[in-house]
Amino acid sequence: MTLAVAATVGALFALGTFLLLRDDLVKVVWGLAIISQAANVYLIGMGGIVEGTSETVPVLATHHAPFPETVDPVVQALVLTAIVISFGMTAFALTLSYRAYQENESINVTEWKQ
């Protein structure tokens, strides 16, 4: 499982970096969105989820030792917040891209007039 998460994070960072280096402004915005999602996958992967311990049952006072291991909810809340922020950032960047297209009549940044 750890190898699959590492490969996924590596592939997402590689694809995002590849898109960031393009001349097309929309591809640059997609690259930023993919890199932010890669960071989210990395945080979830490093959040302490181990196979067989992802029970969602909270530890109650009525339980006796050994308590069931639960996943740390702070990491999941952090990633949920990051997803919402990255969605807003992507929407704003696409709006700015559209405005740049209106001004320069091209989304290729090398063709923009000075």
Image (cartoon, grey):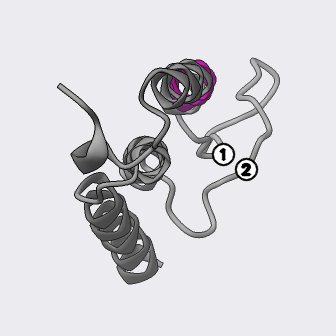
81, above or below 15, in the image: above
Q: On the image, which quarter does residue 68 sit in?
A: top right
Q: Find the magenta span and give its range.
A: 78-90
Q: On the image, which quarter does residue 63 sit in?
A: top right
List x then y, in percent, for residue 79. 53, 31
Left or right for 33, reference 22 = right
Q: In which quadrant will I find the C terminus?
A: top left
Q: Amino acid at mark 2?
A: Glu
**Does the residue at mark 1 contact the one at mark 2 (Cβ under 8 Å)?**
yes
From the viewer's perspective, is the residue at label 1 or at label 2 nearer? 2
29, above or below 108, in the image: above
Q: What residue sits right under mark 2 in the picture?
A: 55
List x then y, in percent, for residue 110. 23, 48
Does the segment drawn in magenta span residue 87?
Answer: yes
Mark 1 and mark 2: Cα distance apart in space: 7 Å
Q: Nearer the viewer, residue 34 or 22?
A: 22
Q: Amino acid at mark 1?
A: Pro
The residue shown at (75%, 18%) is: 61
List x then y, in percent, for residue 33. 48, 43
Residue 6 appears in the picture as rendered:
yes
Q: What residue sits right under mark 1 in the picture?
A: 68
Q: Secondary structure at mark 1?
A: loop
Neighbours of disc 2 within 10 Å: few (<14), some (14-19), many (20+) = few
Q: Nearer the viewer, residue 3 or 62?
A: 3
Q: Which mark is residue 18?
A: none
Q: Secondary structure at mark 2?
A: loop
